[in-house]
Image: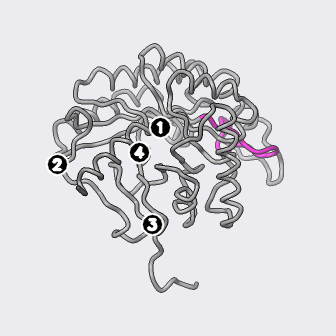
Amino acid sequence: MHLKSSPGPMYRPANRRRVDHGFRWKDGKRIAVLVNVPFEGWSEGAHSGIGPMGNVLKPGVLDTNAVSWGMYGAVRGIDRLLRVLDHHAVKASVMVNGVIAELYPEAVRRAAGAGHCILAHAYAMDTIPAYLGRDAELANIRRTVQLIEEAIGHKPKGWISPRGTPSENTSELLLQEGFRWHGDAYDDDLPYLETHAAGSLVAIPLTMEINDMPWSVRHGNAARELVPLLTDTLRWLSQREPGASMIDITAHTHVYGRPAGAAIFDHLIRTAKSRADVWLATRDEVCTYMEDHFRGAAA
């Protein structure tokens, strides 16, 4: 095995400017809750690697069950989750693949028209940046941006890679293409400023505890158990953590976009909204807040 003589830019602490315990969110609140709605699609002939059936088909066989399961998000799931959000007057961050903007532009426009943050999620879930060379990754980013812009009339400000797995080139390519933030971060539960040769962008971590995909699909936990988990987590953050905190509520359109999941999504939002110490924010709003914070701290 060949080992690099020095760590790459992803691993250098000096590239990351983090907040201290005195940091507070908007209006002095200590907890930010970010609601995410992944609206995902796959390239022709590809499908989700996780599905409702526990048994995996033989290699080389198209899993038509997984294909159909994944299509539910565009057919029914997105509008059901948008109705839940509208009922609570809460804005979400909607992760959109380019293929979704290409095939279902009206649905993406409905989400944008309702005031939700639309962020780029690569062309498709099977175009994972870690698998791509630099040129292919740049083409993937540009194609995704173009398709989303054609659907909603403006470019997305933020990016989250499929599987949350960027390449070592992703941040610099995003900077090159004018992005202001990314969510491919799991090394903190607060945003930080990430600096590269091309400039800086905000890293907004994606917390995974209140997320339907690992919780219900991968690990088989009961959806209803997410509600007490969120309640306990928010209580802990309020009573025991010394500084500010951030947590995500994530519901995929093809997973909790179904009636049983949407009912739990509704409970989760009500739980977060009931707390006076919570700022419910989109990722674009968090980016702007952090940019202002770091700008002020540098003055």
Crowding at dot 2, Cα within 10 Å, few <14 / some 14-19 / many 20+, comes out as few
**Cα gap from disc 4 to disc 3, whole angstroms:** 24 Å
Assign a secondary structure to mark 1: loop
Q: Secondary structure at mark 3?
A: strand
Left or right? Give the position of 172 relative to 33: right
The residues bearing labels 1 and 3 have C-alpha atoms spaced at a distance of 30 Å
* Residue under pointer 1: 211
Q: Nearer the viewer, mark 4 or mark 2?
A: 2
Of the image marks 3 and 2, the number of the one nearer the N terminus: 2
Mark 4, residue position: 207
Instruction: Classify 10 Å Cα crowding around label 3: few (below 14), some (14-19), many (20 and above).
Output: some
Residue nearest the viewer, comparing 77 with 277: 277
Which residue in the protein does label 3 denote? 196
- Residue found 60% across the figure and 49% down from its top: 162
Residue 35 image position (x, y, % from top left)? 44, 32
* Image-based side of 115 in relation to 132, left or right: left
Quadrant housing residue 258: top right
Which of the two labelled residues, at mark 4 and mark 2, occupies the earlier sequence position? 2
Residue 103 in the image: x percent, y percent? 76, 32
